[in-house]
Image (cartoon, rainbow, N blue to C red):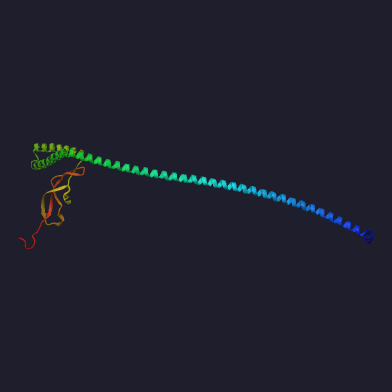
């Protein structure tokens, strides 16, 4: 080894050293350059990929924003249409209600007018039938009293049956023409709206005050109107004079 270094001159040693350094530096430089180029290409590709993704995201966001705006516009339009339709339905229902109310009032007025018209036409004729019926009832009561006194009198019995038959016919005609025949009950309280007092009976019993003692005739009512009140006898309380009076 010493012989080798001794045989080489100083210049040869320097040249060998320089050659070795150059060989080593050249290879490393090429590797470093290649790595640098590769890293640059990868970075460029990554940057290019990121730009495309960003553009796609921006386009998608813009599309979604546009669709959202269009959808919001459609919803607002639909809401306005629903409100308008609801207002029209409310107005229509109100108009129908008003129309029904007017129709109902007109029908009531027409019915009342018709009833009044019929009352004015029918009342005179009904009153004549009522008068005839009450007269028959009075005659029947008298004939019954006579038949009780003379039950063998066939003529009285025949007259009674005939009169009862005709009275029933008149009564049926009145009922068929909506005339209500009401017979007050003995013992019930006197009703001034449907009854008239023909006479009174004085009593000390406070419990009989204003009570019906006897019924002389029926009440006749047509469409809620009293055509002829019932004739009744009513109990009245005896009035005693005050102290100091006659």
Residue under the image location 78 percent in, 52 percent down: 31
| Quadrant placement of the C terminus | bottom left
As drawn, the residue found furthest toward the left would be: 246
Single out the residue that lies furthest toward the front: 11
Instruction: Looking at the picture, tell me which residue is in the foreground, 52 or 235.
Output: 52
Question: Considering depth in this image, is 110 or 196 the residue closer to the camera?
Answer: 110
Q: Nearer the viewer, residue 172 or 141?
A: 172
Q: Residue 22, how many percent across, how many down?
A: 84, 55
**Image spot of residue 55 (x, y percent):** 62, 47
Q: Which residue sits furthest bottom?
A: 244
Q: In the visual, does 48 lie left or right of 10?
A: left
Is 19 in front, or is 82?
Answer: 19
Quadrant housing residue 173: top left
Q: Residue at x 23, y 40 (%)?
A: 113
Left or right placement of residue 95 versus residue 20 in this view: left
Q: Quadrant of residue 133?
A: top left
The answer to whether residue 175 is visible is: no
Residue 206 position by quadrant: bottom left
Tally of marks? 0
Residue 76 seen by the camera: yes
Position of residue 148 measured from the top left corner of the image (x, y, whole percent): 10, 42
Q: Position of residue 169 (x, y in %)?
A: 17, 37
Question: Which corner quadrant holds the N terminus?
Answer: bottom right
- The relative height of residue 246 versus residue 224 in the rendered view (above or below) is below
């Amino acid at each position: 080894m010493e012989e080798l270094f001794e045989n080489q001159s100083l210049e040869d040693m320097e040249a060998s050293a320089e050659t070795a350094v150059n060989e080593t530096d050249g290879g490393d430089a090429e590797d470093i350059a290649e790595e640098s180029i590769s890293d640059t290409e990868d970075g460029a590709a990554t940057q290019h990929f990121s730009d495309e993704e960003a553009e796609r995201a921006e386009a998608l966001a813009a599309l979604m924003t546009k669709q959202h705006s269009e959808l919001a516009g459609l919803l607002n339009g639909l809401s306005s249409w629903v409100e308008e339709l609801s207002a029209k339905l409310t107005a229509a229902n109100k108009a129908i209600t008003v129309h029904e109310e007017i129709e109902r009032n007109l029908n009531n007025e027409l019915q009342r007018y018709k009833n009044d018209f019929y009352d004015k036409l029918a009342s005179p004729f009904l009153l004549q039938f009522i008068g005839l019926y009450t007269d028959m009832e009075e005659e029947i009561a008298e004939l019954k009293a006579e038949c009780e006194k003379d039950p063998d009198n066939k003529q009285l019995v025949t007259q009674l049956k005939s009169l009862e038959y005709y009275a029933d016919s008149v009564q049926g005609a009145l009922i068929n023409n909506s005339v209500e025949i009401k017979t007050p009950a003995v013992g019930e309280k006197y009703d001034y709206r449907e009854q008239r007092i023909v006479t009174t009976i004085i009593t000390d019993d406070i419990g009989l005050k204003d009570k019906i003692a006897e019924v002389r005739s029926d009440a006749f009512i047509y469409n809620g109107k009293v055509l002829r009140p019932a004739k009744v006898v009513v109990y009245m309380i005896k009035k005693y004079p005050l102290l100091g009076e006659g």
